[in-house]
Amino acid sequence: MNQSIEQDAKHLIALLHGFRRVVIAFSGGVDSSVVAAACQKAELDFVCAVTAQSPSVPSWQLDTAAAVAAEIGLSHHVVPTAEVEREDYQRNDSNRCFYCKDTLYATISQVIQGVVESNSGDLTVVSGTNHDDLGDHRPGITAGKRRNVVAPLAQLGIRKSRVRELARYFGLSNHDLPASPCLASRIAYGVEVTSQRLAQIEHAEAWLRSCGIADCRVRLHHDGLARIEVRNNLLESILRLDAEGQLVSQFQQLGFKYVTLDLEGFQSGKLNRAIVPLELPKQFKEKGMAINEQG
């Protein structure tokens, strides 16, 4: 057994044990699943997982979250979030993720009041943010800090590759699940986020998966242009679908006007290359209400 993995697991469990009562912002991805498994092993007084239900979250991801929560043995709550209704979010500038996470954490702070007894002590909300996330453009992390959300993986300096090792160590079935950011992350900055566009992207990626293209991104640009990103070893498979006339026809039926293939291949966060950093409005720079509530 890899002793360093054992030590990382012990440190994570010990850190979480100190909070006693925890609510996990739970996507069902590897990061939040590792945090959830460690919470369960920490034998806390109270722990539950909360997953957002939104047009920006594909249905398969909700199914995965429910299955993994059951596998870990967690109390699991799916709550509707309304970030798509926020003008700040719809505008889709480089701070979109801030408004998404701010909405999620605000919603969690409201719904947990109905989940636990009102006199049962402080609750700490934790996320699956890992150390590698700190080096990317992640305004959602700012939203978490504003709401006093704890990121134990980042706090312990645990990187993504190590998170996957911990997932295997904890025996999680999703240890090799590819990262899947929200569907809005596929929409080029400046193109308005709408429920209809999110559904287009979800259906396009689902169709590609049904054709054997498991790890893919369908990016939506101005003028209804779809840009498909896949791993380099799958480029030929995409071209084969195109040669058979299936791909363009299917995407046009979904409402895309143009269909392109990115020859550079898949790269997570590629749309961030076009970012022009924006200042958050003053009210969001100020420290907001703590999300640790009297539960």
Image (cartoon, helix red, strand yellow):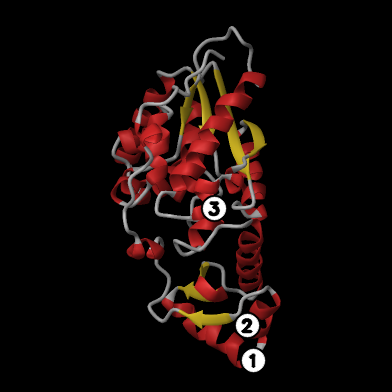
Quick one: quadrant of the C terminus? top right
Q: Earlier in the sequence, mark 3 or mark 1?
A: 3
Q: Amino acid at mark 2?
A: Leu
Q: Check disc 1 and report its element: helix, strand or loop.
A: loop
Q: Residue at x 47, y 17 (%)?
A: 20
Q: Residue furthest bottom?
A: 243
Point out residue 231 in the picture as x, y percentages from the top left corner. Answer: 44, 73
Query: In whole angstroms, how far apart are the C-alphas of marks 1 and 2?
Result: 8 Å
The answer to whether the residue labelled 1 contacts the one labelled 2, judged by CB atoms less than 8 Å apart, is yes
How many C-alpha atoms fall within 10 Å of the one at disc 2: few (<14), some, or many (≥20)?
many
Q: Nearer the viewer, mark 3 or mark 1?
A: 3
Point out residue 32 in the picture as x, y percentages from the top left corner. Answer: 49, 40
Question: What residue would you read off at disc 1?
Answer: 244
Horizontal side of 257 relative to 231 (left or right) equals right
Query: In whole angstroms, how far apart are the C-alphas of marks 2 and 3?
Result: 28 Å
Q: Check disc 2 and report its element: helix, strand or loop.
A: helix
Q: Nearer the viewer, mark 1 or mark 2?
A: 2
Question: What residue would you read off at disc 2?
Answer: 247
Query: In whole angstroms, how far apart are the C-alphas of marks 3 and 1?
Result: 36 Å
